[in-house]
Structures are given as structure tokens and as C-alpha cells.
Image (cartoon, helix red, strand yellow):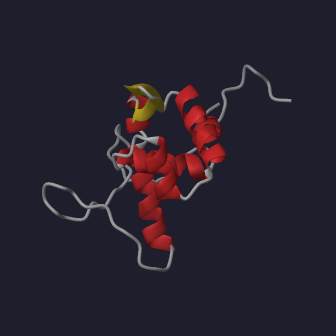
């Protein structure tokens, strides 16, 4: 049993919200502008019951907000919250990792204004050092 006074690992806590592939793919699609159930279902090829669970969990965890867009018939859309928008760099870093370590023809992120490929890196805002270039540890 964990000691409740010991700080929880932030990775473990984040995975409680987005720890499955469907949740991450829903967030990817939400960042691409999808907001409606049928849009997510069509894009992901996910069964409706699983999509309902994922949307509910992402809404409860504060990454998506459910908004009524039609009263007759009642229809909701799912919009990114601040927490959901803050997940974009995580998505981009997952994609960058896949480009470095996977075979195949993978899509690339492109800056809409310049047309240039986006090449994300993670840096420490305090030191400016690229993450992965210095040893780190987790303080508990």
C-alpha cells in the first residue's frame, strides 16, 4: 500500500487521465478540430460504447468540455479545455519519438503559416537545456 504522504509520480497521475490509446487519439482528433461524436467515431473506427466511455472520462478529467450544440434533437459536442489544449505538446513529442524510432511513412506536423515541418523538442524552461541531455531524478 502506498503512503498517502508520499508524492505521486506525475507520469502515473497523467496516465490516470490519458493512459490508453483511445484517449490519446481522441485528443489528437480534438486538436485537429473534431468536436462531434460521429466525427470521432468515423476518424477512429472505434465502437460507440468505447468512444462514449473515453469521451466521458476525458470530460470528467477536465480535458474536454461537453457543450450542447443542438436542442432538437439534443446533441453535444466536445471541446478542448485549457488542460486539453495543454496536451498538444505531449502529442507532438509522442509523434517526434515515433519518427525517430519507427519505420514507415508517417505523417508530419506542418506549421500552417509557414508550411515548414514542425520539429518539436522538449527543453527545461529554467536552464534551457534539451531534455535527455542531462541526468535527472524525481524528488519525492
Question: Is residue 68 found left or right of 139 in the rendered image?
Answer: left
Q: Quadrant of residue 45?
A: bottom right
Residue 124, position in %: x, y? 38, 43
Residue at position x 49%, y 47% from top? 26
Q: How many marks?
A: 0
Question: Is residue 31 found left or right of 49 in the rendered image?
Answer: left
Whether residue 36 is visible here, answered yes or no, is yes
User: In which quadrant of the rendered image does the N terminus lie?
Assistant: top right
Residue at position x 27%, y 60% from top? 118
Q: Quadrant of residue 68?
A: top left
Residue at position x 47%, y 63% from top? 97
Please tell me which residue lies in front, 45 or 79: 45
Q: Is residue 39 above or below residue 55?
A: below
Residue 48, position in %: x, y? 61, 47
Q: Residue furthest bottom?
A: 104
Residue 112, position in %: x, y? 18, 56
Residue 135, position in %: x, y? 52, 52
Q: Is residue 18 above or below residue 73?
A: below
Whether residue 11 is visible here, answered yes or no, is no
Residue at position x 60%, y 34% from top? 57
Q: Is residue 2 above or below residue 97?
A: above
User: In which quadrant of the rendered image does the C terminus lie?
Assistant: top right
Q: Quadrant of residue 46?
A: bottom right
Q: Residue furthest right?
A: 1
Question: Is residue 114 found left or right of 94 in the rendered image?
Answer: left
Q: Residue furthest top?
A: 5
Amino acid at each position: 500500500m502506498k503512503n498517502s504522504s508520499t508524492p505521486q509520480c506525475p507520469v502515473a497521475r497523467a496516465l490516470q487521465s490519458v493512459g490508453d490509446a483511445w484517449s490519446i487519439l481522441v485528443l489528437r482528433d480534438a486538436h485537429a478540430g473534431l468536436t462531434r461524436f460521429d466525427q470521432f467515431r468515423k476518424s477512429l473506427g472505434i465502437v460507440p460504447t468505447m468512444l462514449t466511455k473515453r469521451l466521458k472520462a476525458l470530460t470528467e478529467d477536465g480535458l474536454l468540455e461537453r457543450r450542447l450544440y443542438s436542442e432538437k434533437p439534443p446533441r453535444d459536442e466536445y471541446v478542448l479545455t485549457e488542460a486539453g489544449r495543454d496536451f498538444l505538446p505531449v502529442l507532438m513529442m509522442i509523434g517526434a519519438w515515433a519518427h525517430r524510432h519507427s519505420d514507415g511513412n508517417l505523417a508530419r506536423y506542418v506549421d500552417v503559416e509557414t508550411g515548414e515541418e514542425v520539429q518539436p523538442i522538449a527543453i527545461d524552461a529554467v536552464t534551457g537545456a534539451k531534455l535527455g541531455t542531462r541526468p535527472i531524478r524525481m524528488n519525492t
